Image (spheres, rainbow, N blue to C red):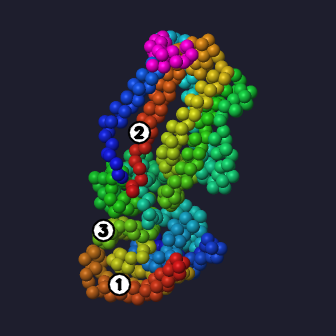
Amino acid sequence: MALTVSGVSKTFAASDGGSVHALDDVSLEVREGEFVSIIGPSGCGKSTLFQIIGGLLTADRGDVQVNGRALNGAPRDIGMVFQEESTFPWRTVLDNVAFPLELAGLGKGEREDKARHFIRLVGLDGFERKFPDELSGGMRQRTAIARTLAFQPSILLMDEPFASLDEQTRILLGDKILQIWRELKQTTLLITHNITEAVQLSDRVAVMTYRPGRIKRVIEIDLPRPRSSEIIASAEFGRYVGLLWQDLREEATRGMADSERKAG
Amino acid sequence: MAGRALNPAGVPALRIATLVGLWAAWEAAARTGLFYEGVVPSSLLVLQSMARHVVDPVFYSHAWRSIYEIGLGFALGTGIGMVGGIALGAHAFSNKAAAPYIHGLASTPKIVFLPILMLLFGAGPGSKIGMGAFSAFFPMVIAIAAGMGEINPVHVRVARSFNASTWQIVRKVYLPSLVEPAITGMRLGLGVAIIGVLLAEIKFSDRGLGHLAIQHYNFFRVADMYAVLLLTFSLAVLANGLMSRVGTALVRRKAPA
């Protein structure tokens, strides 16, 4: 299924009485089966966009469509993976992953069979009966991804799912994500601030500006598929990282100056 | 931390020593006749009276009445406190509006409301159950309303992203997240429910452990009175121990650090 974001704007009231123009006329299309990343500096409104696409926030203007149909308040089938620790600590891996199926009213046997399938897909078989506090951070985030996949969404939407993990784990999990993506042919939109991650995974990368958040440029990543993380060593990979950084540097500099001014 | 490491075996030993010391002081006070005769009876007399009580069916009719009143009052009070706490915690505005009343009432000795409860529910078990419920309600509603603030908002967002209904969010996110505050509320609630019911029985009733103790007092059967108090104390300790068991069984997992 294709995802269309058209003309989305959002302004928040700030705590100092002013307002923050978080998003300004953001438009983007993710084609059926495509992997697209949105990259931007901290504070550029990425997470606001994530919540608007997922339906947890409403836009001031513009709308979000799946296959040409606007989502205004209707039950969504966009699967969200959150940046924060989001597994339920009182549920085992199996019960965490079965959660969306439980909400949908599936019987115990059926939902556990399905949950096991997605647990295998993220490579956590053997850990079904473990609780989140018995797993590493990467395993917990994979549990969260399996849980969202079990929802069987038409669009997979991820907000910096590996932000709290170390670089090497993140690169290896990137391989895992690509493997799952190939298997499910899932339309995917990833929000990140990590340039390597964006190039490693995406068909296209959209660069966002710092405040108000706009789409500055969309860059096609013309690297061969299927990809593995070994591609990081290639000259082409380095060229894309450099290209993105050129675009991002100005935005990140503005973001940093802004936060330093606030701190001072 | 500086200082000596605690010897884990030393704690129970100290507890036993304290108990033996207290008993020796009691016995010494009884035998020297330092106090007015009968105020401090010999521990032997108290023990004999306890033995008489535990084989006496009359004692059990009093004990069962108290257990019934405490149990029902506790269940009603904590149940209503749970629902009220969730409702308050879910609405920041009403929580703010109600907080001064709840905290004010919570720190008021509930016994001042006994006359009202007797008017409402009569002089029998009804007013005692009312006292138990009224007492147990406050620790629970306060613990749950505070616990609602500790619920991880990401867990709620996850449920919403899967199109969970409000009732599903309450059942599958709120309730499991509230197990710990609920246990705190229940433990505090049980203590004040016992106090409330026994006080009400002492004030005005025809049965119950509080009534039995005050009857012994009225007829100056001091050793019997102590025996009933000790038996009541044992029951309270037993109930609290049971509650802790239930608590540890319910709290299976904490959030990963």
For label 3, the SS is helix
Earlier along the polypeptide chain: callout 3 or callout 1?
3
Give the image location of residue B98, x and y in percent. 68, 49
Residue type at tag 1? Val
Does the magenta segment cover residue B21? no
**Image marks 2 and 1: residues in contact by CB distance under 8 Å:** no
User: Mark 2 falls within which chain?
Assistant: B
The segment highlighted magenta reads B28-52
For label 2, the SS is helix
Along the line of sight, the residue nearer the viewer: A216 or B87: B87
Residue type at tag 3? Thr
User: Mark 3 falls within which chain?
Assistant: A
Give the image location of residue B79, x and y in percent. 58, 38
Give the image location of residue A227, x and y in percent. 29, 76
For label 1, the SS is helix
Which residue lies at the image location 36% right of the left edge and 36% below the top edge?
B11
Nearest-to-viewer mark from 2 and 1:
2
Residue B249: which numbered mark, if any?
2
- Where is B210 relative to A136, above or below? above
Residue A241: which numbered mark, if any?
1
> Mark 2 and mark 1: span between their CA atoms?
52 Å
- Work out whether residue A16 can be spotted: yes
Which of the 4 image quarters holds residue A137? bottom left
Does the magenta segment cover residue B36? yes
What residue would you read off at disc 3?
A: A169
Disc 3: CA contacts within 10 A as few (<14), some (14-19) or many (>=20): few
Residue type at tag 2? Ala
Give the image location of residue A177, x and y in percent. 34, 68
Left or right relative to A183: residue A257: right
